[in-house]
Amino acid sequence: MPYSSEDQNWIRDQLHTQHVGREIITYTTVESTNDLAKELVTAWDKEGTVILADCQTQGKGRSGRTWYSEENVGIYLSVLLKPGLAPEQIAPITLIAGVALTQALNEFSRTRPVLKWPNDILLNGKKVAGILTENHKEDGHSGIILGIGINVNHTRFPISLQHIATSLAMENGESFERPPLIAAFLNHLDREYSGFLEEGPSHAALQWNQHSEMFGKHISLKQGTETYSGTAMKLDDEGRLVILLDSGEEMAFVAGEITSME
Ligand code: BTN
């Protein structure tokens, strides 16, 4: 069932937030909630606005990939944030969203969600949620679009995704109402975001370290045309991934893609 106006009001009633969810706009089908939120940066410009869709026809993932957005079963939402920070300071927003997602999923899932840097949330080693953070600037307005996709009640995935994707329902053997999960996520996100604005990224980095199982593992990280291999150590106080490279040198990364983990 698409979201009803009762769902929208119910979610709003559950929120005790400072920034996130002041406006919640729901749609049945959109191309991409992130793209719709970008239009809002100029037309609407209210921090904390949430765009929620039941289905996306061109859901976007990281690195130009598509996000499988089947109707009725997933959560596809974007939040417009305006922290007033320089583009190089916004990477922790993805970390904050990851922490908030694990906190929210923990309230519903018997299987513990774990974080894989920088934007994946896994259940039993498969991806259950992803984050796409985009910086948008237009006509003198600027904002960050935080896009969240959660596989909630999917019972199967296209063959190409079956080995890497899962859903909350598939891992727990039951289906879930989407509005309580959305409200829990928005409340956690608001708390983590407020903490970040007040204290910087160190708190989120600490939390992130506690919700990940990648540390101590040997990883390969691709950044542009370069690939770095070594042991993942931790996120440092600035939210950067510290790797002890096979060469013995320690390096901290703000961005990149993990291509293997053993
Ligand atoms: C990833 O893991 O690659 C990021 C996935 C992000 C998907 C969400 S769904 C809602 C929002 N709108 C989009 O087009 N993408 C994000």
Image (cartoon, rainbow, N blue to C red):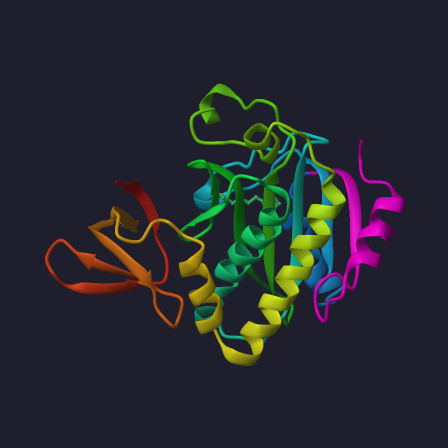
- Position of residue 189 relative to residue 120, above or below, is below
Q: What span is colored magenta in the figure?
A: 1-30
Q: Quadrant of residue 179?
A: top right
Q: Which residue is rendered at x = 42% and y = 59% of the image?
A: 210
Query: Looking at the image, can residue 91 be seen?
Result: no
Image quadrant in which the N terminus is located: top right
Q: Nearer the viewer, residue 45 or 102?
A: 102
Q: Quadrant of residue 58?
A: top right
Q: Nearer the viewer, residue 208 or 64?
A: 208
User: Number of labelled discs?
Assistant: 0
Q: Quadrant of residue 259?
A: top left
Give the image location of residue 96, x and y in percent. Answer: 53, 62
Q: Nearer the viewer, residue 218 or 84?
A: 218
Q: Which residue is rendered at x = 53% and y = 21% of the image?
A: 158
Is residue 10 found inside the magenta-colored segment of the image? Answer: yes
Ligand 1 shown in quarter: top right
